Amino acid sequence: MNPAISVQNVDMVFPAPGGAITALQDVSFDIAEAEFVSLIGPSGCGKSTALRLIADIHQPTGGSVTVAGQSPGQSRIQHLVNLMFQEPVLLPWLNIYQNVSLSIEITKAKDHRDPAELLSFVGLKGREKDYPGQLSGGMQQRVALARALATNPRILLMDEPFAALDEFTRDRMGNWLLSIWERSRKTVVFVTHSIPEALYLSDRVLIMDANPGRIRADVRVELPRPRDESMREEISFFEQLKAIRSQMPKSLYVEEELNGG
């Protein structure tokens, strides 16, 4: 079976006044259907750039990217991929039902999900007529997740979606995401600076290094599913955490401490 995502020998160079910037160099990885993979690494290592290549926002200057066995552009046109950003980016003059519906109206996706069903799916049943300003940050991100799922993509790309939340809400959102992933089995590529978050959520963790961005290590997570908060206190969790930290660049450890990871 072909991988859901295949990135092979990819280079990404951006022109700049002071000289070209190499965001990614010779980056290769495959992600299987229904796999949950996290990308971690220091700022500037190209994590978000990798997501944008998969989402067809950027085109690589070298190498190849395939999504669902075809080009990212073809997958985008077929609504097979959706990208969720760090901020929820909800329209304040529309209620949350309308915000979720808007993605369906804009894309005209035929294989879409019912917005009311999705809001129930993310735990917001009964809040359909509320406006974004009436919701907490965590609730707004749940609306953004419902919107990302509205076109029923096979692949969900998540660019640090919980980074702006407090630690308690962030952990709770991680549990929400896991429960939704268990039911939907989407392929997920999740960018984060938090190593414990990456370990808790993922099947694999891709560790990136910077200057230029490249894959430093590909670590398979050996933790059983389903997972719950009690797993974070188990010896096996701390052993895997230690193994991942031993392979990461020192700059990422500093960033993780600053971000409360």
Image (cartoon, grey):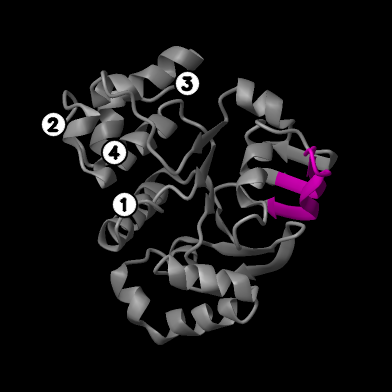
The residue at which mark 2 appears reads as 126
Q: What residue is shown with label 1?
A: 176
**In the rendered view, would you say 34 is above or below 115?**
below
- Number of numbered discs present? 4
Whether tag 4 and tag 3 are in contact, CB under 8 A, the answer is no
Magenta part of the protein: which range? 6-30
Find disc 4 in the rendering and name its residue.
140
Label 4 vs label 2: CA separation? 15 Å
Instruction: Say whether marks 3 and 2 touch (CB < 8 Å).
Output: no
Judging by the rendered image, the residue that carries numbered circle 3 is 111
Q: Label 4, label 3: how many angstroms apart (C-alpha)? A: 24 Å
Label located before the other in sequence (3 or 1): 3
Of 149 and 163, nearer the camera is 163
Mark 3 or 2: in front is 2
Q: Is residue 25 magenta?
A: yes
Marks 3 and 1 sit apart, C-alpha to C-alpha, by 24 Å
Q: Amino acid at mark 3?
A: Asp
Per the image, label 1 sits on a secondary structure element best described as: helix
Q: Position of residue 57 (x, y in %)?
A: 65, 31
- Residue at coordinates 62% horizontally, 76% vertically from top-left? 250
Mark 2 / mark 1, whichever is N-terminal:
2
Q: Earlier in the sequence, mark 1 or mark 4?
A: 4
